[in-house]
Each structure stands twice: as C-alpha cells, then as structure tokens.
Image: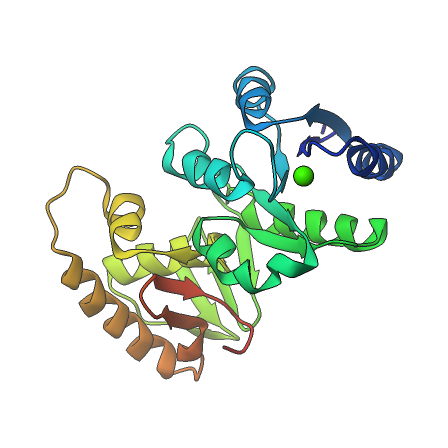
Amino acid sequence: MSARQILVVEDERPIRDMIAFGLRRAGYVVLEAEDCREARTIIADARPDLLLVDWMLPDMSGLELTRQLKKDRDTRDLPIIMLTARAEEHDKVTGLEGGADDYLTKPFSPRELLARIQAVLRRTAPAGEGEVVQQELLSLDTAGHRVMAGNATVALGPTEYRLLAFFMTHAERVYSRSQLLDRVWGGNVYVEERTIDVHIRRLRKALADHAVEHYVQTVRGAGYRFSTRPV
Ligand code: CA
C-alpha cells in the first residue's frame, strides 16, 4: 500500500511546519494549505486520505469547510480531524455535528496527533466485501451480511441490517435523519423521516437481546450516532 496522504489546513506557519514534520517522520505524505480555497484545490487534485483542519482560518472557518466537504457527495467520506484552540473547546459538539470525525485541542503532542489519525483512518476505512468490522462486542461480516454479538447472531431485518452496517462503519459521527435517509435508504426513495425512528427502535430492540442497545445513541436536536463509548 502506498503512503497515506494527509492535508494540513492551517494558516499559522510554525504550527503547520511542526505538524508536517511529525507526520512526515511517521511515514505520511503531507500536503499543506493556508486557507480553505487552497484546501479545496488540493483536495480536488490530490484526493488526500485525511484532513487536519484548523478551526480558525483566514477565508472561512474550518467548521464551515468541514460542513461543505461533508455535504458534497465527492468528499463526504473524506475523514476530517478538527484542530481547535482551548477557548473553543465548548464548541466540540458543534464541530462533531458539522461532520468532523474527531477533534483535537491545541496544544497537542505529535504522539497524540498520530494516535488520533490512526484511529480515524481505521474507523473510516470503507468496508470491503468479505471484511469483518469489529465494534467492541459486535462484529459485522459484510460478506455474510450478518452481525454477531459474541458467538450469537443478531436477528435483523434487511433495513435494520443496512442501518447497523452503516452505523458500524461510520462510528462516533452524528447523522441527522435526512443524512441517514440519503446514506442508508438512498437519495431517490421517498421515505418519511419518522420512518427512520421506527427502524431505529427495531434495531435497538434487536440489540437489546444482546444488551448492547446503548450503542445506538440519540443526539438531541441532531440525530443518531453509533458509539461503543458511554454517552
Ligand atoms: Ca489558524
């Protein structure tokens, strides 16, 4: 496998240099952008594997850039880690709801940054056919279209399976009902948003048989999230 490309979007040169140095030493190919406009160009040309986006950028906020990329069909699966200053820490939830896959507060150590990058790349890798995705007690077998809880099969209808498979391959991120409709049902189908709540309920019921219904979490005013971490 060729080296992974990471795009660092940060206008402060010393911070960008420091991040780039650590990433290059760890074997990543590093691309650099000073603002969102430059980032968009590089993303279109080079198709990086992951983005590090600073919150404060000269032309547009990193949050707005993240929102735009996550709305665009071509870039929505591009993993994004948001970098913030300590004062903005309370904005964490907003950042994750904007679609960022993780966030890191400055100052952070190179080791911490590398650990987050590896975790996000692992978590967001598209599940190939025949691959098994493990999320704590659950394992998703994409070839067998089956989800196991330990040694027991989780009894799921086809829609609940698709929903859970999507959740398990997109863990920790919050999805609104309309995003779930788009991603799990497909954009063309006419389904009412409250239909999703029905399937979420069925999914939780199936997971409750294995005492893991808490993995499917409701995020008030935002949507749903799959997480094996406590709420
Ligand atoms: Ca900045």
As drawn, 163 above or below 150: above
The N terminus lies in which quarter of the figure?
Answer: top right
Residue at (49%, 62%) from the top-left corner?
Answer: 93
For residue 2, say whether it is visible. no
Comparing 16 with 213, the one in front is: 16
Identify which residue is drawn at 30% across, 52% down: 180
* Residue at point 78%, 48% (across, down): 114
- The x and y percentages for residue 76 are 44, 37
Q: Which of 84 and 146 is in front in this view?
A: 84
Question: Residue 219 sits in which quadrant?
Answer: bottom left
In this view, 106 is above or below 215:
above
Classify residue 104 as left or right of residue 24.
Answer: left
Dividing the picture into quarters, in which one does residue 19 lie? Answer: top right
Horizontal arrangement in the rendering, residue 146 relative to residue 228 (left or right): left
* Picture quarter with ligand 1: top right
Asked whether, in this view, residue 84 is left or right of residue 129, the answer is right
Query: Residue 22's x, y, as percent?
Result: 86, 39
**Colouring convention used in this rendered image of the protein:** rainbow
Report if residue 175 is visible in the image.
yes
The residue nearer to you, when weighing 105 against 75, is 105
Residue toward you, 128 or 199: 199
Point 55% across, 28% down: residue: 36
Q: Is residue 162 above or below residue 41?
A: below
